[in-house]
Amino acid sequence: MPNNGMNEAGDKMATNRGEAPPKRRSKKAGPFLKVKAGSAVVPIYRAESNGRVRFTLSFYRDGRRMRKMFNALEDAKKEAMFVAQRIQSGMQHVTDLKPHERDNYKAAEALLEKLGIPLYAAVEDYVRARTLAGAESLSVMAMEYGKMFGNIVRCATVPEAVAELLKIREQDGASTKYLGQLRTTLNRFATKFPGPILEVTGPDVDAWLRSLNIVATTRNAMLRCIKVLFTFAKAQNYLPGEKNTAVEQMQQVRVKSEDTTIFSPEEMTTLLHNAPPDLVPILAIGAFAGIRMAELERLDWKAVDLERKFIEVRAGQAKTASRRVIPISDNLAAWLTPLERKGKIVRTKELQTHVPALARALKIGWPRNVLRHSFISYRIAIVQSADQVALEAGNSPSIIFKHYRELTTEEQAEKWFGIMPKEGQWENTLSYDRKKRRVILNGIERD
């Protein structure tokens, strides 16, 4: 009976005759090692092929199975711990980095930890700086920046710097007029630029001044005040002090040179012979000594030495901040001797408005700085020396030579410095109503 591989009961029998026995399915090998971080577990599998051992990580990210292979167990363990930690903290996407990239990442974070700056912010700042610097070295630029700005003690705002400047100038005894000019200009400036003074640029200031639609002389006066502020800010270490700021480098507007206007000896005689005693010092000292009105306001009678025949303008009183001595001519001495010489020469500010009012009442024009211009013109005609007149007038020889030379003759100059008081001179009276612009001269109302 042929053997068909079945027993009498009909069961299949194992046999090795004529065919190999069926292979048994082996159980799947488990992980070689498990790395844990909290509840997250990352298995490491070990596999050997052709005598070469490989270690494989197997984990899931975003629903997808991920595998990474390593030749060294320590590298595999290090990566597995990193993956497990990121899985635990919900940052699986960081596992996109390769090991050497992640080492760089961690090293960068460690460097920035001392500064408290996030890596992204540091990279963003670097890219911006690199773009601005072009081919220049950032470290060299940083060193130069440190040299320039390292001495800045604090980032003062424009209003803070203005308030401090005005307070110090007032303590230093600056004149009321000068303080008023600084206060008016710089308070407007602070309102326009309320931020840090370090951020104010030359083009910003230029655009603002142009927008005011003011005449060139006013614009130049305002710019001078602003430059005073920036010089002060440098001295206080609110601005770099090694070189001029952009604002300090701004040029004043070129003012069209006007013809120098002077009084004739006849006009000056008419003015002085009709002037009341309180206006005589202003007119006479301006015409025969050439002292600026702003300087005259600061002088008292102690500056006038009639015995030695000179007027002293001290450095703190002079516009140019340098002392000068002006000789007193014989006719000026004649005008000043009868006056009561105590206290201020210009007793009240109202007298400044009375002088041009007197000129208008006498039908005489009152050009700007006409008394000073007249003195310089007639003085140079007599002494024939621009250097000497420059010393007396507190000006430069080049300006004297350019604007005042040959405007008059020596004969006219002798008439000018020969104007003397008339009989009954000191009985003149003048009343001026500024609001109504009404002048009463020697009891007669003038149009």
Image (tube, rainbow, N blue to C red):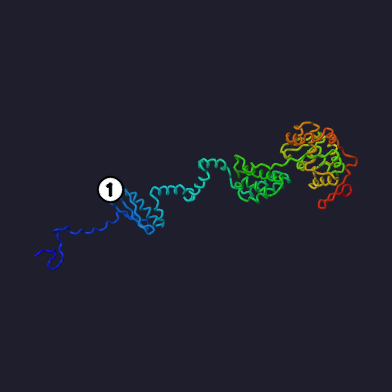
- x, y percent for residue 212: 69, 49
Please tell me which residue is depicted at 32% across the width and 54% down the height of the picture: 44
Residue drawn at x 57%, y 43% is 149
Give the tally of numbered discs: 1
Task: Depth check: give the residue in front, 220 or 164.
Answer: 220
Residue 352 visible from this viewpoint = yes
Question: Horizontal and vertical percent for residue 97?
Answer: 40, 51
Spot the residue most to the right.
423
**In the orientation shown, which residue stands out farthest toward the bottom?**
9
Q: Which residue is mark 1?
A: 52
Report whether residue 163 is seen.
no
Q: Residue furthest front?
A: 2
Q: Residues within 10 Å of mark 1 (few under 14, many from 20)?
A: few
Q: Judging from the image, what secondary structure is the residue with disc 1 in?
A: strand
Q: Is residue 108 left or right of residue 375?
A: left
Q: Nearer the viewer, residue 159 or 287?
A: 287
User: Please, is residue 311 above or below residue 182 in the view?
Assistant: above
Going 37% across and 59% down the picture, which residue do you hit? 63
Percent of width and height locating residue 7:
12, 66
Q: Quadrant of the N terminus?
A: bottom left
Q: Is residue 314 left or right of residue 239?
A: right
Q: Is residue 20 left or right of residue 55?
A: left
Q: Quadrant of residue 246?
A: top right
Q: Nearer the viewer, residue 149 or 401?
A: 401
Q: Position of residue 379 (x, y in %)?
A: 80, 34
Looking at the rendered structure, the kind of residue marked 1 is Arg
Residue most extreme to the left: 1
